[in-house]
Amino acid sequence: MTKRLGAALLLLTIFTANAEVETVHPPIPLTEQQEALYKGLLPELRCLVCQNESLAESQASLAADLRYEVRGLVAKGQDEAQIKKYLTDRYGDFVLYKPPFEQRTALLWAGPGLLVLLGLIMLVAYTRRTRGVPTAPPKNDEAALKKILDDAP
């Protein structure tokens, strides 16, 4: 009996841990200009729990909370830079799809180009090395050549 109770509690814990909690927020009215800023910001901000989804696309409850938070900041009159700074101070550069180019993010921005450059250098070195290696001359085996010619129709 205790094993079944323990298994049931374990399953209940697993299912409730993965369940999304629906959050309901009171509406925050925005002017047309503020609404445009709000809708322009959402695709540029990343959901913190989803795999590569923006706040505009995500259906996670945390994304709904962040959308509400961004809407409140827009309603308070903050501009795009202030909102992004507020979010990055709180959640780090991960919240932005395009992190700023800084010393600590330089490898993130330059890394792909450096990898392509390294690949090209390796390709050039390989082709130069293989081009300089002489190939063995074909064997001049007269007996094998005669046999081939004799077998030909």
Image (tube, rainbow, N blue to C red):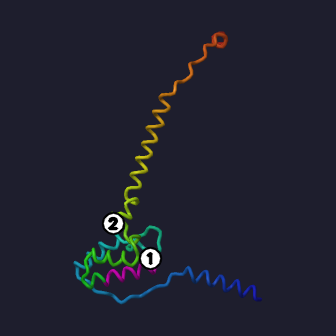
Q: Position of residue 118 (x, y in %)?
A: 43, 46
Residue 153, visible in the rendered structure: no
Give neighbour class at mark 1: few <14, some 14-19, many 20+ (Cα, 10 Å).
Answer: some
| Disc 2/disc 1 C-alpha distance (Å) | 26 Å
Q: Position of residue 22 (x, y in %)?
A: 47, 85
Residue 61 falls inside the magenta stretch: yes
Q: Position of residue 151 (x, y in %)?
A: 67, 12
Give the residue drawn at x 75%, y 88%.
2
Residue occupying the far right of the picture: 1
Per the image, label 1 sits on a secondary structure element best described as loop
Q: Magenta region's main secondary structure? A: helix
Give the residue drawn at x 47%, y 74%.
49
Per the image, label 2 sits on a secondary structure element best described as loop
Residue mark closest to the camera, 2 vs 1: 2
Q: Amino acid at mark 1?
A: Gln
Q: Earlier in the sequence, mark 2 or mark 1?
A: 1
| Front-most of residues 98 and 90 | 90
Position of the N terminus by quadrant: bottom right
Q: Which residue is mark 2?
A: 100
Counting the numbered discs, the total is 2
| Quarter location, residue 3 | bottom right
Q: 84 above or below 127?
A: below
In the image: residue 10, left or right of residue 18: right
| Front-most of residues 80 and 126 | 126
Give the residue drawn at x 40%, y 59%.
107
Chain part drawn in magenta: 58-72
Residue 88 falls inside the magenta stretch: no
Q: Amino acid at mark 2?
A: Pro
Q: Which residue is mark 1?
A: 59
